[in-house]
Image (tube, rainbow, N blue to C red):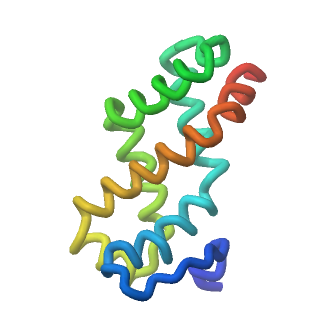
Amino acid sequence: MSLRSLRPEIPVDTSGSSPVETFQHETLRPVLKLLNDNLLRLAASYLAKYGTGFSEMDRADQIRKVRNLMTQDSRLKRTAVGMVMGHFTADEFAFYLENRHELRRRIIDLLETRIVDQVDDLADDLAAG
């Protein structure tokens, strides 16, 4: 079984896209979707570690907290990027290495968006303990 066969399909027309944009749509987005539950658990563990009272915050503060966490916590970013990279094929990893700065930024941006979009679920998970 190949790594690509595990990923959910996200149909996107990439004609006219740059190679980095194509990689984002054909590789990064499906990998992030595949890892969604584990990435949310990762974010929840970092929020719980800092004892932020995340569940009691209003939604705007929760979103600010997630955005701050994603910009400030280098360990979280490294761990999340490593989780994503671990699901690359050899060719995808070679492409990543050639474009690592741009792709790392895109991974973090996509991940932040995914977590913000699911902030209610994240708060519920933290409240449940």
Where the C terminus falls, by quadrant? top right
In the image, taking residue 125 as reference, residue 103 lies left or right, namely: left
Q: Which of 79 and 18 is in front in this view?
A: 18
Horizontal and vertical percent for residue 76?
41, 38
Q: Which residue is drawn at 30% across and 78% down?
A: 95
- Can you see residue 119? yes
Instruction: Answer left or right for 24 relative to 6.
Output: left
Query: Where 55 sits versus 20, above or below?
Result: above
Residue at image location 35% in from the left, 74% down from the top:
93
Identity of the residue furthest to the right in this view:
128
Give how far across and how far down residue 11 sits, in percent: 61, 78
Name the residue rendered at 31%, 71% in the picture.
96
Relative to 76, say whether 4 is above or below: below
The image quarter containing residue 31 is bottom right
Instruction: Count the marks.
Output: 0
Mark yes or no: residue 3 visible.
Answer: no
Residue 126 versus residue 102 in the image, above or below:
above
Residue 89, horizontal then vertical, whole percent: 45, 79
The N terminus lies in quadrant: bottom right
Q: Which of 24 and 87 is in front in this view?
A: 24
Residue drawn at x 52%, y 82% is: 13
Residue 103 is situated, as x and y percent measured from the top left of the image, at 32, 63
In screen coordinates, is 42 left or right of 99? right
Q: In which quarter of the image is residue 53?
A: top right
Of residue 59 and residue 23, the one placed in the foreground of this image is 59
